[in-house]
Image (cartoon, grey):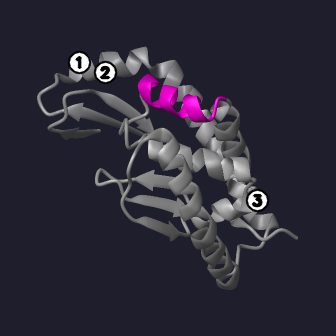
């Protein structure tokens, strides 16, 4: 449990299946325990899912060869050629501005958007179909309107990518295998 100057109580399950409760400094432990009890089924479900994913990642890493530094450089070069033009087009369509665009090799994120409007994208996107690249770009640009994942945020994404749920599922289903060389 982590206490901080937050106002809300939240439960997180990380990629290893570990549970963390974040709570306001002065919230009574009885209230925290009640909340945990109410969310017990959700916690069990997410811990189970994360353990399955962890096992799948482990099995995948045993079977496949990680991407080489040379391949990463090629993916970054290609991403720097393709992504900025797509960002420009979608930003105009959505009606938002943005700051710098950075391309990196990341293990846990496909993209991110800072409060200043700077965009980061994973070079592994170059191993995905074009519509997945477009979805990630639209997702990050929609954060320029809504810096959260509220229903309003998803409504913005849906205006541009009506089948965004399929794209999200594709990334969840295939994301881990993109870290490895295709043999």
Of residues 41 and 147, the one nearer the viewer is 147
Q: Which residue is mark 1?
A: 30
- Rendered location of residue 75, percent (x, y): 66, 73
Taking 90 as reference, is 59 left or right?
right
Q: Is residue 110 visible?
A: no
- Quarter the N terminus occupies: top left
Q: Is 91 in the magenta?
A: no
Q: Which residue is at 46% across, 61% downward?
A: 120
Question: In the rendered view, would you say 82 is above or below 174?
Answer: below
Q: Is 159 in the magenta?
A: yes
Q: Is residue 142 visible?
A: yes
- Local SS, label 2: helix
Start-end of magenta stretch: 151-162
3 and 2 marks in contact (CB < 8 Å): no
Q: Which residue is mark 2?
A: 33
- Local SS, label 1: helix
Instruction: Give the overall secondary structure of the magenta segment.
Output: helix
Q: Which residue is mark 3?
A: 60
- Rendered location of residue 30, percent (x, y): 23, 18
Question: In the rendered view, would you say 176 is above or below 81?
Answer: above
Mark 3 / mark 2, whichever is N-terminal: 2
- Rendered location of residue 148, percent (x, y): 38, 36
2 and 1 marks in contact (CB < 8 Å): yes
Of residues 158 and 11, the one nearer the viewer is 158
């Amino acid at each position: 449990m982590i206490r901080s100057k937050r106002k809300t109580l939240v439960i997180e399950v990380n990629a290893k299946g570990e549970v963390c409760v974040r709570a306001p400094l002065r919230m009574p432990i009885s209230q925290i325990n009640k909340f945990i009890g109410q969310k017990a089924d959700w916690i069990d479900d997410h811990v189970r899912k994360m353990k399955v994913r962890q096992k799948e990642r482990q099995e995948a890493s045993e079977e496949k060869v990680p991407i080489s530094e040379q391949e990463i450089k090629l993916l970054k070069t290609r991403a720097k050629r393709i992504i900025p033009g797509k960002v420009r087009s979608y930003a105009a369509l959505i009606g938002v501005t943005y700051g710098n665009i950075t391309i990196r090799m990341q293990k846990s994120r496909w993209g991110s958007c800072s409060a200043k409007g700077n965009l980061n994208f994973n070079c592994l996107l170059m191993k995905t179909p074009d519509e997945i690249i477009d979805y990630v770009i639209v997702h990050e640009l929609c954060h320029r309107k809504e810096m959260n994942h509220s229903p309003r945020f998803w409504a913005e994404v849906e205006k541009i990518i009506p089948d965004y749920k399929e794209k999200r599922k594709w990334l969840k289903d295939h994301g881990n295998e993109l870290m490895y060389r295709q043999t």
